Amino acid sequence: MSWIEPVRETRHRVQDDLLSAGLGLAGLRAPPPAFADPASPTPDELRRRAIHASWNGIADLGPDGGYGSVYGGAPAVPGREYAAFARVPGAHAPHRVLLQVPDAFDGEARCLLVAPSSGSRGVYGAIAVAGAWALPRGCAVVYTDKGAGSGYFDPATQTGVALDGTRAVRGTQPLEFEPPGAHGAGIAVKHAHSGDHPESDWGRHVLQAAAFGLAMLERAMPEAAPFTPRTTRVIAAGLSNGGGAVLQAAGLDDERVLSAVVAIAPNVHVAGRGRALYDYASEAALYLPCALLDARFHATPFARRADPSAWQARCATLHAAGLLAGADRAAQAAAALERLQAAGWNDRALAAAASSTGFDLWRALASAYASAYLRRGADAMPGGVRYGVADAARGEAGVTMRAAWWSDASGIPPGAGVALLGGAEASADPHGRSLARLRALWSGGDADAGAVRAAVAQTAARVPRRDLPLLVAHGEDDGLVPIAFASDAYVETLRASGREPSYWRVPHAQHFDAFLGWAGFGERYVPLLPYAHAGFDAMWAHLAGAPAPGSRRFASRPRGNGPLERAALGL
């Protein structure tokens, strides 16, 4: 592989460690750390805030969530980091890779976790998943943003994000993302606008990150070289999109780089089984607002809005288009629900999906992924949408907002001051027609729909080699990546091919641990992160000679109104 030199080496000790950037668990639970100069934060400040954002975007750190008492922790782990931009052959944009090497690296049982970010997050996006387990045990961790991340490019100022996280002008140094010929007032985002279809390369990003990690371990500890898959256990571990990435890598690992794979709630697509994310996300964006008006969801968190008129208008839009039967809103909601159920959604997934619907997440996902699949630029996104900032974000306010993008943004707007604009009309259902166009990119028959379906086909995970230990864990109440559409389909494919993966099903677990702190929501569920860490324990023991972890369904139960108790996890 190749990466863009120079590699940036930094040391993190005393008040600035690898796992929490010196914040500790109390600091991670506190508001984001401030910048001394908001218009010009230092690389150390940006790193600390990026780590804080990555923890809070994944883990439930609330007082009742049990993190740090029932499971997990954030001890100080001193060590070094090695960061670079890597590039898969033929790609326009690089992906970030970053290795963390603890000072207490275990030279006797040498271990490297390869951890792609969940969602479209930046390079620290998997720190609460992989780093929290590996670094205190003396394992190194290498991360990749897998061609996404928060290195937004601003055409108005011609600035992007440099390797150290600071903003820099195009042409002055290598940038995380700089689209060709970008101009105008929009904001360019790497996942949506690189022209690379990064999702089809997730497996290659993971394997490149593994190669980078091994090479940097040799740079960090030349006296202990060589670091190779024969001398070092290499475990690929990921959550959500990161889980899909490690399963893609498992199918591409012809050189036997990986010792084991652990995928948690993976967004994985397999040919001929299940459903692809764009299929059910575009469907949910269009139909769920109407379906959630059904009476069975009256007590479901996020299924009732203070002003229900927009969701009621969605029922009317679908009825007028001939997509739903029913003479009144109740009948139309029931018809929308029946349509989703016929497509494979169950009530548990729909109830959890109400949160994604309430936050308009389905529209954000469909817009970004459609743009990536069609390789569109920032000024030509499907559905008539674009990313931009409010007029108020000019002058000093705009400078400080842009300076914090790399640390604060999630990789798919809206968020961190970047809005999803356009695609609306003056009606009671302003986004209905735009969402119908996005849905037609999957269900339609024109050239763009064919291109989207072809792009999705390129993301299908292959069956891995027979002797690769593999564990998949998934929450049965997942409403963002429903288990029936993803993990069930993947495991069925493996079993049909004579493979025997370890498959862990977790009742009462949904997709977003970070949502569990919300009143009325967390009481219904258990966190998923404890099962990720238990999966790492089981796979590590297996690599040390224990039997492979068996498939199981946990006897978990909802947390209830009090703090999480260990017994609720069924571990």
Image (cartoon, helix red, strand yellow):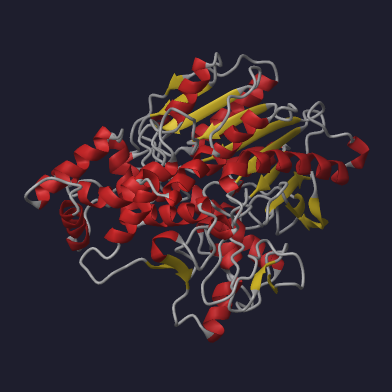
Describe residue 9's horizontal placement relative to residue 403 as left or right.
right
Question: Which residue is at a point 70% across and 64% down the rendered structure image?
Answer: 175
Residue closest to the eye, 275 or 504: 275
Residue at far left of view: 327
Residue farthest to the front, as pictured: 446
Say whether residue 375 is visible: yes
Viewer can see residue 519: no
Residue 381: give x, y in percent of width and height.
Answer: 47, 62
Q: Considering only vertical position in the picture, is 343 above or below 320?
A: above
**Relative to 452, residue 412 above or below:** below
Instruction: Please count the marks in the image.
Output: 0
Percent position (x, y) of residue 467?
66, 17
Q: Which residue is at a point 55% across and 30% down the rendered structure image? A: 534
Q: Which residue lies at the image location 55% right of the left edge and 13% below the top edge?
A: 498
Furthest-right residue in this view = 223
Question: Could you tell whether 46 is left or right of 286 in the image?
Answer: right
Q: Position of residue 3 (x, y in %)?
A: 79, 51
Which quarter of the figure is the N terminus placed in?
A: top right
Residue 237 picture quarter: top right
Measuring from the top left, give residue 12's x and y in whole percent.
75, 56
Name the foreground residue: 448 vs 38: 448
